[in-house]
């Protein structure tokens, strides 16, 4: 009886050892295709995200360049407007000086551009 129990124990131990050794191989065979598929999907997603990132970076660079160009155009317009305003202000100052000079002359009340008797 003890011999039968020892043989049964050895058979069970051998079966457990066999299952343990072959389990890793069976798991790899079963999960291998799923892991490969998942790796392929991750690579495809990574490539798509990189493509989108490059597109966004390029669009941001174009926007930045356009903003710089717009800024230069606006600055040019402001400089032109400033120059025109300065010219107009100088002309107004000159006209005011002329009016003051004419109003300070005794007996003269004629504004520039007016005809006598108006």
Image: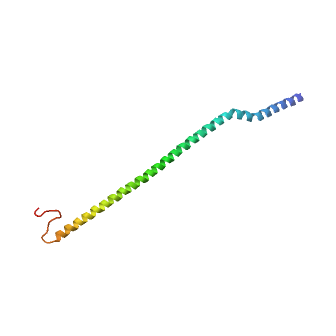
Question: Where does residue 93 sit, x and y in percent of width and height?
Answer: 25, 65
Residue 74 vs residue 30: left or right?
Answer: left
Quadrant of the image occupied by residue 99: bottom left
Q: Height in image: 59 above or below 91?
A: above
Residue occupying image coordinates x 35% and y 57%: 78
Residue closest to the eye, 111 or 113:
113
Residue 103 vs residue 59: left or right?
Answer: left
Colour logic: rainbow
Question: Where does residue 52 sit, x and y in percent of width and height?
Answer: 53, 43
For the image, the number of numbered tags is: 0
Quadrant location, the C terminus: bottom left
Residue 57 vs residue 36: left or right?
Answer: left
Question: Where does residue 90 sit, x and y in percent of width and height?
Answer: 27, 64
Residue occupying image coordinates x 71% and y 35%: 28
Question: Where does residue 115 sit, x and y in percent of width and height?
Answer: 13, 63
Q: Height in image: 89 above or below 40?
A: below
Residue occupying image coordinates x 22% and y 65%: 95
Quadrant of the image occupied by residue 116: bottom left
Residue closest to the eye, 20 or 40:
40
Residue closest to the eye, 49 or 116:
116
Residue 28 vs residue 109: left or right?
Answer: right
Quadrant location, the N terminus: top right
Residue closest to the eye, 21 or 7:
21
Residue occupying image coordinates x 17% and y 69%: 102
Quadrant of the image occupied by residue 42: top right
């Amino acid at each position: 009886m003890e011999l039968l129990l020892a043989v049964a124990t050895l058979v069970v131990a051998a079966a457990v050892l066999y299952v343990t050794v072959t389990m890793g191989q069976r798991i790899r065979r079963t999960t291998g295709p799923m892991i490969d598929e998942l790796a392929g999907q991750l690579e495809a997603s990574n490539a798509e995200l990189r493509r989108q990132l490059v597109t966004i970076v390029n669009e941001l660079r174009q926007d930045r360049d356009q903003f710089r160009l717009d800024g230069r155009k606006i600055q040019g317009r402001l400089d032109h407007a400033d120059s025109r305003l300065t010219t107009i202000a100088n002309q107004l100052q000159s006209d005011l000086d002329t009016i003051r000079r004419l109003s300070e002359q005794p007996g003269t009340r004629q504004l520039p551009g007016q005809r006598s008797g108006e």
